[in-house]
Every structure is written in C-alpha cells, then in structure tokens.
Image (cartoon, rainbow, N blue to C red):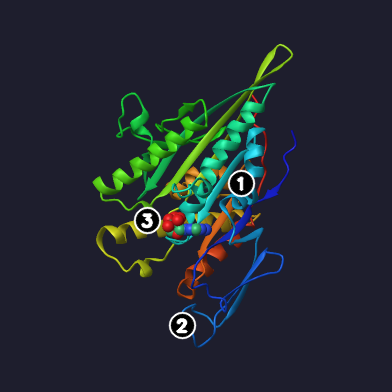
Amino acid sequence: MHAVEKKVRAFVRVKPTAQFAQDVIKFGPDNKSIDIYIKKDAKKGVVNNKQTDWSFKLDGVLHNTSQELTYETVAKKLVSEALVGYNGTIMCYGQTGAGKTYTMTGATAEYKHRGIIPRAVQQVFKAITRSVDSFITVRISYLEIYNETLCDLLSTMTSSGASDVQMAIVDCPQGVYVKGLSIHSVSDEEDALNLLFEGETNRVIAEHTLNKNSSRSHCIFTIYIQSRFRVLSDVRCINSKINLIDLAGSERLSKTGSEGRVLKEAAYINKSLSFLEQIIIALADPKREHIPFRQSKLTHVLKDSLGGKCNTVLVANICGEALHVEETLSSLRFATRMKWITTEPVINVT
Ligand code: ADP
C-alpha cells in the first residue's frame, strides 16, 4: 500500500457575536484567508512589535456557519476515510469561550446544534448499516488530561466502576495507546451517545467534587473501528480510530489573572500547549530527527495524530471581538503552523 503525503488541514471558526470587530477582522473573498488589522494607537503595545496587519491562509474560514456545514467541511471526509481504515484526528484549539466545545460536542438544547462527535457517530453507524461485505465493530473511549494527569471519563461504565486505575501512555509498533483506559463496545448510535453523555456528566461531577475547571483540561473522545472481511478463505481485519479532541483554553497566563489552583492549571495548560507548538515547529523541519513527543501527556497521546499515519484537521475557534484580538492572533498563528505538518496516512490491515 503506497502512503500518500498529506498536509494537516486547518480551519478557523468564528464565534458569532453582536460585537464583531469589522475593522479588525476581514475575510478573504474565497473564504480561505483572514486578515487582522490593528490600528497602531488603538492597541498600543498589545502585540509587542510594530506590525499592524496580518494575513493568514487556511483551508477554510467558517463564519456564520451552521453545525451541519461545519461538519461537512471539516469532518465528513475524514470520517469516511476512517471507515476504510485511515486513522483520523480532529482537534479544536482556542481561548475559553471561543466555541471549541460547541464545535466538538455541540449544545444539547436542539438537535441541529449537535457538534462533530454526535455527527461522526451517526456517520459511522449509517455506514455500518449499509455495509454488506464486512462486519464492522465500534468501540469508544473518553480520556481527559488535567494538570498532566490522565483521567478515564468512562471508568464508571466498567464492571468495577473504579476511577483509580493507573493509566500510562505506551508506545508500540501499531502506535500510541493508553494502558488502563477503558474501551467500550457499542452496538448502535444511541449506545455511543450514552457514553458521550456519561463522560460529560463525569466531567461535570469531577468539576464539583474535585474542584476542577473543565475548560482547563484536554478531552479526547475516540471512536475505534474494526472491519472484518473475507478474502478467499482468510479473514482480514482493518483497524482505525478517530480522535476527537477538545483542547483546554489557550488563553495566556496573564489574562487569567489568577492565583492558587487556577494559576497552577494555567501553567500546566500553557506548558502542554507550548510543547504542542514546539512539536509542530519541529515536525515541519525536515532535518530534525528527534521529535520530543514525550515531554507532555498531550503531545505523547497525539504522537500518531501529528507525526504519523493519520488524517489530521485542526479547527481554530476564535471570538470576533476586538477585545480578544491578541488571542485570535495567537490561535491563527497556531493554525497556520499546523498546516506545515505533513502526515502519511496508511491503512492498517492485519
Ligand atoms: P469553549 O469550549 O471554547 O470554552 P464553548 O463551546 O463553551 O467555548 O462556547 C461558549 C458559548 O458560546 C456557549 O454557550 C456556546 O453554545 C456558544 N457558542 C460558541 N460557538 C458558537 C456558534 N458557532 N454558534 C452559536 N453559539 C456558539
């Protein structure tokens, strides 16, 4: 099987707001570029250099875009390819409140507000219903990384219900996996959505009982797909997985203006997101031999997604208000750097 090099695809999604800064943010006519203008005296000192306008080229700008169109644009192809054996990763990056969870999970109030996770689950099960020549099984896990600690959001669904199982990230020839993380078989869309709901509920419970702030953790919902089919008298297996990642808020330490626990959380997030950025820069350098994936839990878990045989999509979520322009610039820089990365997706047949 020939591996074809692919670039990571990066999109920006703008959260709709009544205070949209029309004089600061402008979209290119093709909806593939976004320009940021900051008047010199209006935002004096904010960006630490003399540049006052920036232009970013991306794979798409999602502005006033429905959940359905967002899914079609960023996720549908990746999920179709996962169904034929290619691993896929979609991650949402941006400051707290910019719409990462809305994009990834969606709002529960109305069906049309469903995010990427429930729509991906639906696409997978629709494909299974149509499949005639293979037997497809689906499993789910839901991992949270909080202050460099791995937490199984579905531990309550295991027979022991234990949440204190030691977890560790393990490298093996097939890729990275999390030892101790529970993985659950699901037979239909409803089963899978129940697990999503269970994980979300556990996250909220931990937020109250352990005094955690859920926007300060990285969450990875993984759909594992296995297709078994016959080739003459042999049974072959194709394995793939889709990682759907809601990253912790990327706002800077100074902006959180906090102390104690919140300061500690912000320090961990800044560290893991800046390691992620370092990995991205290192991956784009063809001369670089060692990529330090193991320096944080997040980058270690994402090793396959960034450095490997995987289709990868990033959604940078931004707020359109002038007040947030600094964070917007930083998220757009991150998104354009992601586009430097090349991966080589291959099908995993055994
Ligand atoms: P984050 O996960 O980045 O902290 P959220 O996804 O929680 O941000 O979004 C903050 C609020 O804004 C939520 O109430 C969410 O429903 C709303 N929101 C975000 N993006 C959109 C959007 N594109 N359309 C409608 N509402 C949105």
Q: Could you tell which of marks 2 and 3 lies nearer the N-terminus?
A: 2
Residue at 57 percent of width and 36 percent of height: 122
Residue shown at 31% from the left, 25% from the top: 160
How dense is the environment of label 3, judged by Cα within 10 Å: few (below 14), some, or many (20 and up)? some
Instruction: Identify which residue is drawn at 31% across, 29% down.
Output: 161
Q: Residue furthest bottom?
A: 41
Earlier residue among tags 1 and 2: 2
Is residue 185 depicted above or below 346 in this figure? above
Residue 20, image x, y percentages = 52, 72
Q: What amino acid type should be assigned to the residue bearing mark 2? A: Gly
**Numbered circle sitting on residue 123:** none
The Cα atoms of the two marked residues, 1 and 3, are separated by: 29 Å
In the image shown, does 103 or 213 lie closer to the viewer?
103
Q: Mark 3: which amino acid?
A: Tyr
Q: Which residue is mark 3?
A: 268
**Distance (Cα) linking label 1 and label 2:** 38 Å
What residue does disc 1 label?
Answer: 75
- Residue beneath the point at 74% across and 33% down: 1
Badge 1 vs badge 3, beta-carbon distance below 8 Å: no
What x and y, as percent, mark residue 200?
A: 39, 43
Q: Which mark is residue 45?
A: 2
From what the image shows, is residue 291 above or below residue 198?
below
